Image (cartoon, helix red, strand yellow):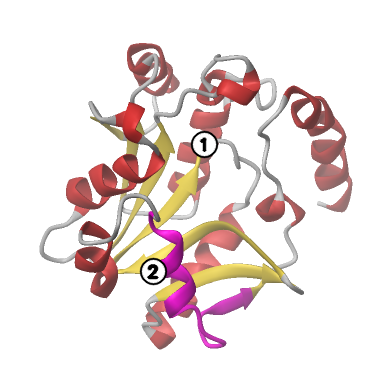
Amino acid sequence: MIAAVVLAAGLSSRMGGRPKGLLRFDDRDTFVSRIVRTFNEAGVGEVVVVVGHQGDAVAIEVEQSGLPARIVRNERYLKGQFTSVIAGVDAVDRDGVEGLLLALVDAPAFSAETVRALVERFEQTHAPVVRAVRGPLHGHPVLLGRVLFDALRNADPSSGAKPIVRAHVSHEGDVAVDDEGAFVDVDTPAEYAELPRLLARLRARA
């Protein structure tokens, strides 16, 4: 089984402190419910949302969405995003879980088709890192094989997960996707203001 971990614990300082998970994605979803919904639509067996900053509010949003997801509270979120990665790894690490899809709550626009493509490539190759790519860009989410779980736990917290991911990317693990939303991050109010135009383009292409 492949599980999914949504990192939604950060301070959202560049967004003025409001949790990004609570930002409206569209008329139906917030950022966090959109990501959970996408994983559900893609057939992911378990979805975990790691919360920290204003965690009760984010948890309530997930619960009120009615979507299947488990809330995990990261009491160490002030020490940085990597603590949420480890909280997510620990939450899903059990017999039968072969890997996890790692999603950032500020990148909510990837499609279920992209998720299915990543899982399919992992099942074909068992590459330790499977990611969506478009030319030189790599996008969201990223699939990390179980073989990397202990490496993540033992990583230098000051460096986080990036060195481990970079050390294990491969041609066989890179999946070219035609999904503009997989390459969009919403970190600032200016980027959030551009989101409706992105969604309009995605709907037009669909």
Q: Residue at x 34, y 27 (%)?
A: 78
The quadrant in which residue 44 appears is: bottom left
Q: Are marks 2 and 1 in contact (CB under 8 Å)?
A: no
Q: Nearer the viewer, mark 2 or mark 1?
A: 2
Image quadrant in which the N terminus is located: bottom left
Q: Residue at x 16, y 66 (%)?
A: 96
Which residue bears the numbered disc 1?
A: 105
The quadrant in which residue 51 appears is: top left
Q: Position of residue 12 (x, y in %)?
A: 54, 24
Circle 2 SS class: helix
Amino acid on which disc 2 is placed: Ile
Mark 2 vs 1, N-terminal side: 1
Report if residue 63 is visible in the image.
yes
Q: Position of residue 80 (x, y in %)?
A: 38, 36
Q: Is residue 40 above or below residue 121?
A: above
Circle 1 SS class: loop
Numbered-mark total: 2
Which residue bears the numbered disc 2?
A: 164
Q: Is residue 202 magenta?
A: no
Q: Nearer the viewer, residue 186 or 2?
A: 186
Q: Residue at x 40, y 16 (%)?
A: 64
Q: Residue at x 54, y 19 (%)?
A: 22
* Residue 23 as seen in the image, left or right of residue 55: right
Q: Is residue 187 above or below residue 165?
A: above
Q: Nearer the viewer, residue 69 or 192?
A: 192
Q: Position of residue 16 (x, y in %)?
A: 62, 15
Q: Nearer the viewer, residue 176 or 19?
A: 19
Amino acid on which disc 1 is placed: Val
Q: Which residues are magenta?
A: 160-175
